[in-house]
Image: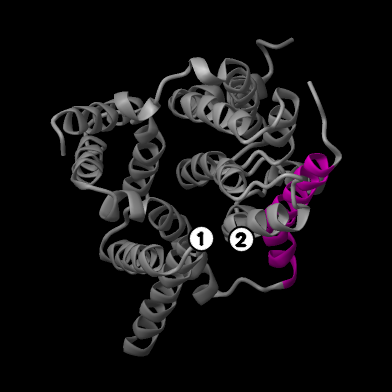
Amino acid sequence: MTLDLNTLLAIFAMAAATIFTRVGGLVLIRYVEIDERRRTAIEAIPPAVLMAVIAPTAFATGWAETLACAATAIASHRLSMLASVVVGVATVALLRAAGL
Amino acid sequence: MLQQNPSAGEFRAGMRAIFPLIVAVLPIGLVFGAVSVTKGLSPLETTLMSALVFAGGSQFVAMDIWTHPASWIGAGFAALLVNIRHLLMSASIGTKMQSFSGIKRYIAMLFLADEIWAMAEFRAGATRLTPAWYAGVVTPFYLTWVGSSLAGALLGAFLGDPAVIGLDFAFPAVFIVLVMGFWKGPETGAVLAASGIAAVAAHQYVPGVWYIAAGALAGLAMAFWRGRAREQAA
């Protein structure tokens, strides 16, 4: 159970950076008035950010991942979140086992 | 009494909502712990990082670039880059926290991981987002992330490769389900297309994690542009 000073400093720096980004938006909206156009943009944030995070996995990793993403998306129309995730994980495992 | 308190019901509803994500994050935490010991971090250091940073993406990136002795500038700057999207996320969810007192808003933001934020946005779209529901989402998720990081660091080498049974895919799968939930028609389709194309292009040609910022900004730009086009047509 060692605790290196440099490591501790690095962890604090990461924590400070993360807190800055998490609280920053909240501070920002106190000073920026939200008009109709800004509201439209704010509403676009959730899908835009989520898509950016998963896009490389979905379109640029391999066929197993691309097809499993499609399977998950289709499953999510009818199944619960947990069931859809199980469908996705099972699909990717099977396709990887098949050598895709 | 707990039973008579409506916020206890909200807390439990939050715990139910986050459950699938607990299942998804557990293996990721184990993998993070296992990776961090191979980089020379002690189980205590690994657990501290998960507890204080609580942002998986930036923690994995930090492990990618980890040096000995650790560079606080490098790790801090990497965390800033990877988590800059949280700025957008907190601005977005901040407009939906009417039932949070001032101090509660700031405390809530400290726990704004992707999964927490996505669930909160989802909740705010369906009903009123309350502090009790938010706490119900955060508590088990936070404990799972910190606990599984510690477990991964202790078990380390005993863990196999999670990619074999596809567990590494749980995280993207959850995000896909959430994206589908935000679908509101062609406007959303345009935003998703812009974000996806920009993210993949940036991922191919720019090293590091700029792809997340590129995708998010492209999606925003598309929303702005479509909004303006609609105003001019009206």
Residue B150 position in % (x across, y down): 65, 21
Q: Position of residue A27 (x, y in %)?
A: 75, 62
- Asked whether A49 falls inside the magenta stretch, the response is no
Q: Position of residue A65 (x, y in %)?
A: 25, 42
> Which numbered tag is attached to residue B42?
none
Left or right placement of residue B96 versus residue A83 in this view: right
Taking the spot 41% from the left edge, 56% from the top edge, the residue there is A47
- Magenta region, residue range: A6-31
Secondary structure at numbered mark 2:
helix
The residue sitting at 78% across, 41% down in the picture is: A7
Q: Is residue B79 left or right of residue A61?
A: right
Q: Nearer the viewer, residue B231 or A100?
A: A100
Are discs 2 and 1 less than 8 Å apart at CB? yes
Q: In the figure, B39 relative to B201: above or below?
A: above
Q: Which residue is mark 2?
A: B81
* Residue B87 sits above or below residue B20 on the image: below
Give the amino acid at mark 1. Answer: Gly
User: Label 1, on which residue?
Assistant: B208
- Chain of the residue under label 1: B
Q: Are marks 2 and 1 on the same chain?
A: yes
The residue sitting at 51% across, 28% down in the picture is B31
Disc nearer the start of the sequence (2/1): 2
User: On what subunit does the disc labeled 2 rest?
Assistant: B
Horizontal and vertical percent for residue B32?
A: 55, 32
Q: Nearer the viewer, residue B112 or B60?
A: B60
Number of disc labels: 2
